[in-house]
Image: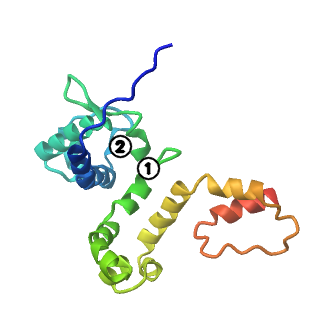
């Protein structure tokens, strides 16, 4: 049996440049999520012209943007000039199981963006970037921004979705009379525990 060799890696300079420009892809995916591109394409392929009004975008700029998304496998462009979702783009829909739209709006959103922009100051000072930018801790800020807090909770469920059932399965809670999930937000973890130990 012949050994398959690993695909060649780009040179270090190219890999570092790719890492440095990763924010561009993040902003592309965020923009697609914030405009609701996937929801608009859920029922049928559409041209950028058809999507300009519902997204509030300039049709030509939107067409260029959507063509860019085809380069990353999120959309496809048909010969008729209409765009369609790919399997990779499907979880950007807000109405499907496993949707990551809310998570992307949180992880690549403005408040996260501003926090990461200040990250070099955290390395220099040891102070949390979020606190420096918003002049308060993150959970205090979320308490004042309920829409963002809701998205943050959805993000935690998405990111940590496999953990609550694993915790409920791994630990015997049967001897507990009271269980408190401190900072439980959506109650996802507590829900799994209570489902197994009513």
Q: Position of residue 125 (x, y in %)?
A: 33, 83
Q: Position of residue 111 (x, y in %)?
A: 33, 70
Q: Please report the residue visible at 20 percent of the width from the left and 47 percent of the height from the top.
A: 13
Q: Quadrant of residue 60 in the image?
A: top left
Q: Please report the residue visible at 26 percent of the width from the left and 70 percent of the height from the top.
A: 117
Q: Which residue is mark 1?
A: 94
Q: Quadrant of the C terminus?
A: bottom right
Total marks in image: 2
Q: Quadrant of residue 4 in the image?
A: top left
Residue sticking out furthest to the top: 1
Q: Quadrant of residue 151 in the image?
A: bottom left
Position of residue 50 in the picture relative to residue 89 (left or right):
left
Residues at marks 1 and 2 touching, judged by CB atoms closer than 8 Å = yes
Whether residue 43 appears in this view of the structure is yes
Q: Which residue is mark 2?
A: 38
Rendered view: 187 above or below 39: below
Q: Mark 1 and mark 2: span between their CA atoms?
A: 8 Å
Q: Please report the residue visible at 45 percent of the width from the left and 74 percent of the height from the top.
A: 146
Q: Position of residue 40 (x, y in %)?
A: 33, 43
Residue 154: assigned label: none
Q: Of residues 171 and 54, which is closer to you in this image?
A: 171
Q: Please report the residue visible at 77 percent of the width from the left and 62 percent of the height from the top.
A: 194
Q: Residues within 10 Å of mark 2 (few under 14, many from 20)?
A: many
Visual colour scheme: rainbow
Q: Of residues 95 and 103, which is closer to you in this image?
A: 103
Position of residue 147 in the picture relative to residue 116 (left or right):
right
Pointer 1 or 2: first along the chain: 2
Classify mark 2: helix, strand or loop. Answer: helix
Classify mark 1: helix, strand or loop. Answer: loop
Q: Of residues 71 and 53, which is closer to you in this image?
A: 71
Whether residue 50 appears in this view of the structure is no
């Amino acid at each position: 049996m012949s050994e398959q060799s690993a695909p060649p890696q780009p040179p270090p300079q190219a890999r570092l440049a790719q890492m440095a420009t990763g924010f561009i892809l993040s902003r592309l995916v965020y923009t697609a999520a914030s405009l609701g591109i996937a929801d608009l394409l859920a029922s049928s392929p559409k041209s950028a012209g058809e999507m300009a009004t519902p997204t509030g975008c300039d049709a030509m700029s939107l067409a260029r943007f959507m063509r860019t998304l085809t380069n990353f496998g999120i959309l496809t462009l048909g010969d008729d000039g209409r765009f369609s979702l790919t399997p990779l783009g499907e979880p950007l829909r807000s109405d499907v199981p496993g949707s990551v739209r809310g998570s992307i709006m949180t992880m690549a959103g403005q408040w996260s963006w501003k926090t990461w922009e200040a990250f070099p100051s955290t390395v220099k000072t040891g102070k949390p970037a979020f606190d420096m930018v918003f002049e308060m801790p993150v959970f205090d800020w979320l308490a004042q921004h309920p829409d963002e807090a809701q998205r943050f909770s959805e993000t935690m469920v998405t990111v940590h979705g496999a953990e609550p059932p694993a915790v409920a399965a791994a630990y015997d809670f049967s001897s507990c009379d009271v269980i408190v999930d401190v900072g439980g937000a959506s109650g996802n973890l507590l829900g799994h525990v209570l489902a197994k130990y009513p």
